[in-house]
């Protein structure tokens, strides 16, 4: 649809159509399927749509297009969703300082569960806490969820991660 409208609509209108018809479907249930390796196919489709809206070539890099259009790529959307889920459920989380008394650098981080299996290490429950612990303290300390979401989106737009692993290693 966006491809057929690109010659008659402005990029601003195409972005609105993207938000209404594509982005809303991306976000539905994202915490459940966003970490799956098969989500790469959907991410490729998102990049194709972004190139159409941004009037870029077929093989052009999308990182700057995502920034210019103020749209988070699928991996960043997933990161955003799972971290907002953690922030919304902070009362259910345990901190490292609650488990042991020794002073460590990670004392104020959330406690991750011990896991042995790869599927659990890739689950949103485990990944979300790991990602949350990597956030700058200025964002973690925010109390209001609306401000947290705004600052988190800004941070993700500055870095534009193409995978959760890329975010973990940054």
Image: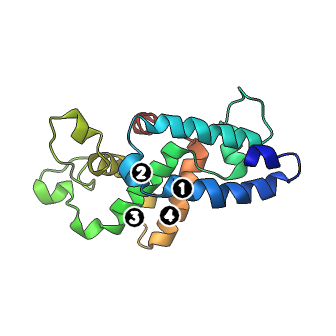
Can the viewer see residue 137 in this picture?
no
* Dot 2 or dot 3, earlier in sequence: 2
Which of discs 1 and 3 lies nearer the camera? The answer is: 1
Query: Percent position (x, y) of residue 90?
Result: 29, 66
Q: Residue 96, located in which quarter of the rendered image? A: bottom left
Q: Is residue 144 above or below residue 62?
A: below
Q: Earlier in the sequence, mark 4 or mark 2?
A: 2
Does 103 appear above or below 150?
A: above
Disc 4 and disc 1 in contact, CB within 8 angstroms:
no
Q: Residue at x 38, y 42 (%)?
A: 35
Instruction: Identify which residue is drawn at 18% across, 50% down.
Output: 103
- For residue 87, what is the image quadrant? bottom left
User: Which one is earlier in the sequence, the residue at label 1 or at label 3?
Assistant: 1
Q: Secondary structure at mark 3?
A: loop
- Local secondary structure at mark 2: loop
Q: Which residue is mark 1?
A: 25
Quadrant location, the C terminus: top left
Disc 2 and disc 1: Cα gap in Å?
27 Å
Check disc 3 and report the residue beneath it: 141
List x then y, in percent, for residue 143: 41, 72
Q: How far apart are the two marked residues, 2 and 3, measured between alpha carbons?
A: 10 Å
Residue 135: assigned label: 2
Query: Is 37 rendered above or below residue 104?
Result: above
Q: Residue at x 45, y 59 (%)?
A: 139
Left or right of 47 on screen, residue 86 = left
Side of 66 where 167 appears, left or right: left
**Distance between the alpha carbons at the discs numbered 3 and 4:** 12 Å
Q: CA distance from mark 4 to mark 2?
A: 12 Å
């Amino acid at each position: 649809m966006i491809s057929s409208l690109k010659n008659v609509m402005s990029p601003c209108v195409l972005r609105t159509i993207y938000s209404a018809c594509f982005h809303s479907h991306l976000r539905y249930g994202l915490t459940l399927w966003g970490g799956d390796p098969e989500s790469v196919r959907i991410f490729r489709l998102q990049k194709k749509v972004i190139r159409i809206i941004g009037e870029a070539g077929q093989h052009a890099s999308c990182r700057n297009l995502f920034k210019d259009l103020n749209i988070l790529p699928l991996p960043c959307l997933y990161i955003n969703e799972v971290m907002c889920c953690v922030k919304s459920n902070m009362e259910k989380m345990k901190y490292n300082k609650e488990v042991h008394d020794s002073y460590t650098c990670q004392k104020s981080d959330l406690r991750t569960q011990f896991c042995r299996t790869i599927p659990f290490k890739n689950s949103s429950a485990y990944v979300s806490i790991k990602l949350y612990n990597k956030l700058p303290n200025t964002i973690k300390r925010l109390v209001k969820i609306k401000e947290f979401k705004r600052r988190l989106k800004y941070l993700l737009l500055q870095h534009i991660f193409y995978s959760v692993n890329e975010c973990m290693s940054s």
